[in-house]
Image (tube, rainbow, N blue to C red):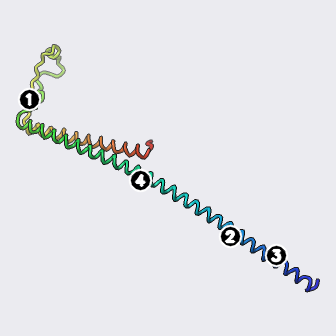
C-alpha cells in the first residue's frame, strides 16, 4: 500500500472516530441532563412531602399543646378548689364547728366477740382530736390528694400525647 492510499483511509477512520466520540459525548450529555432533571423532580417532590409532613406534625403539636394546656388549667382549677375546701375545713375545725375524733380501743381483746355490735347497739368510745392535730392530719391527707391529682394529670397528659401521635406502646 502506498502512502496515498492509506492516508485517505486513515483520514476517514480518524473523522469517524472523532464523529463517534462527539456523538457519544452528546448522548452522555443528554443522559446526564435527563438524570439532573429526574433528580430535580425528585428533590422537589421530596421537599413538598417534607413540607406536608412538617405541617401535619406542627398541627399535631399545636393540638397536643392546646390539650396539655387545657389539662394544666383543669389541674390548677382542681388544686385551687381543693385548697379552698381544705382551708374552709381547717377554719371550721379551728372554730369548733367541726370536731374530729378517733375510736379508742377498750380494754377488751380485739378477738373477743362483741355481742352489742351484733345487735346494732354498740357504743364506741371516741377521743376528740385537738384542732392542731386535726389540721396536721388534714394537711397530710391534702398533700396525698394533691399528689394523686398531679399523677392523674400526668397520666392524662401521657395518654393525650400517645393518642395525638398514634404511638403504639409495647
Give the residue furthest to the right: 1
Q: Which mark is residue 16?
A: 3
Tell me the CA gap for discs 2 and 4.
42 Å
Mark 2 highlights which residue?
Answer: 29
Mark 1 highlights which residue?
Answer: 127
Tell me the CA gap for discs 1 and 2.
101 Å
**Mark 1 touches mark 2? (CB < 8 Å):** no
Q: Position of residue 119 (x, y in %)?
A: 15, 13
Earlier-in-chain disc, 3 versus 1 = 3
Considering the numbered disc 2 on the image, is that residue within a helix, a strand or a loop?
helix
Q: Quadrant of residue 120?
A: top left
**Mark 1 touches mark 4? (CB < 8 Å):** no
Mark 4 highlights which residue?
Answer: 58
- Placement of the C terminus among the 4 image quadrants: top left
Side of 13 relative to 118 (left or right): right
In depth, the one of 92 and 43 nearer the eye is 43
Amino acid at each position: 500500500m502506498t502512502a496515498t492510499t492509506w492516508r485517505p483511509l486513515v483520514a476517514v477512520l480518524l473523522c469517524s472516530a472523532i464523529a463517534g466520540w462527539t456523538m457519544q459525548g452528546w448522548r452522555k450529555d443528554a443522559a446526564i441532563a435527563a438524570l439532573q432533571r429526574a433528580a430535580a423532580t425528585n428533590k422537589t417532590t421530596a421537599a413538598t412531602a417534607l413540607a406536608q409532613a412538617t405541617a401535619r406534625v406542627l398541627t399535631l403539636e399545636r393540638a397536643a399543646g392546646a390539650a396539655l394546656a387545657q389539662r394544666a388549667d383543669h389541674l390548677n382549677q382542681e388544686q385551687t378548689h381543693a385548697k379552698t375546701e381544705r382551708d374552709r375545713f381547717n377554719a371550721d375545725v379551728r372554730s369548733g364547728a367541726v370536731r374530729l375524733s378517733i375510736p379508742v380501743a377498750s380494754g377488751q381483746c380485739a378477738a373477743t366477740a362483741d355481742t352489742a355490735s351484733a345487735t346494732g347497739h354498740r357504743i364506741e368510745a371516741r377521743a376528740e382530736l385537738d384542732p392542731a392535730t386535726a389540721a396536721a392530719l388534714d394537711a397530710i391527707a391534702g398533700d396525698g390528694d394533691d399528689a394523686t391529682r398531679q399523677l392523674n394529670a400526668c397520666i392524662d397528659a401521657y395518654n393525650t400525647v400517645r393518642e395525638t401521635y398514634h404511638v403504639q406502646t409495647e
